[in-house]
Image: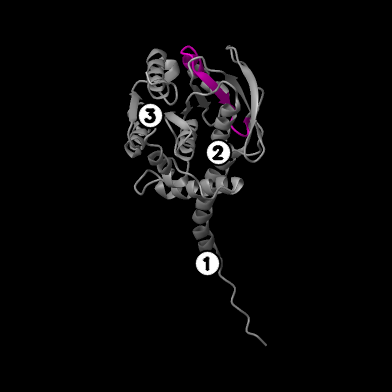
Amino acid sequence: MSTPQPRPSRLKLWLRLILLLPTAAYVGIILLGAVPLALAVTVPLKGKVCCLDLPHEDITFQTADGLALSGWYIPPTNGATIILLHSYYLDRRQALPMAQMLYRHGYGLLMYDQRASGESQGYVRSLGQRDIPDVSQAVSWLESRSGVEGKIGVLGCSMGGAIGLAAAAADPRIAAVAADAPSPMTFDEARPRVGDSYWGVTLPIYTLYYGFVNLANLTFSATTTVSAIPKIAPRPILFISTGQGGEFDRVRAYYNLAGEPKTHWNIPTSSHCAGPVTHPIEYEQHLVDFFDEVLLGK
């Protein structure tokens, strides 16, 4: 007969429970932080999009994997066209203030909803990763249009700026990029540093968060903004930032990675992507001066 094992005392059971509770709470905090974040950035944000108060054509073009992306197209009168890339949680309407500015100076415009946003097809968003090659498809669509023979530039804000930079690194047909507050696209760029506030919590949250997003999109070899920027030269880049804190520091670091020619314009008294609204005259002047020089040779 086997010897009966002694049952743990109630004290030992309580001690084990007390020790397990902090671990369970820590794991719960990590999951409650990572999972909602991952869901928020991957869920589609679709809806009816209207209206552009400029003469335009409603268009669609195909992605390499067969999705239809919806947008607006205005042909150029000055011989150059700008592809406008909206920020992450919005649709093509976010770029309307910039569109109005560039239209006044004769630029053609192609502004479209990124995949799984606005009126475009798609079932999951990818923190920009799957949107990068779509910019090349937009360039090809423009090249297929009769009368579109001039240079093509890209203008994007926030994640749109990061997508534009990464697309230009991969496609030499993009002649210039204006990136307003470009975002980090991967865990390596956004990784909390040792010594940051709540590092012991934010690091595992970010690790799981980016892991879930990559898993949902099967994008495990993700493009980074940091790796893309040095590949763009000698094509010019205009970096735009606001404030004097984290955004300014991040964009300045991106600027330092870029080859010549490059420009960094900071708007100290504005906020993220708000320059066209808070400083419309200066913003328009910077955009037009940049694109006039690099696309029109003025």
Query: Is residue 216 shown above or below 59?
Result: below
Q: Position of residue 88 (x, y in %)?
A: 53, 32
Residue closest to the eye, 232 or 270:
232
Determine if the magenta segment contains residue 113. Answer: yes
Q: Secondary structure at mark 1?
A: helix
Give, as a three-letter code, the residue at label 3: Phe
Q: CA distance from mark 1 to mark 2?
A: 59 Å
Task: Give the residue number, with chain letter if any, for mark 1.
Answer: 12
Please tell me which of labels 3 and 1 falls first in the chain: 1
Task: Give the residue number, with chain letter if any, for mark 3.
Answer: 239
| Quadrant in which the C terminus appears | top left
Q: Secondary structure at mark 2?
A: helix
Residue sitting farthest toward the bottom: 1
Q: Nearer the viewer, mark 3 or mark 1?
A: 3
For the magenta stretch, what is the residue range? 99-117
Residue closest to the eye, 205 or 108:
108
Q: CA distance from mark 3 to mark 1?
A: 61 Å
Query: Is residue 214 shown above or below 153?
Result: below
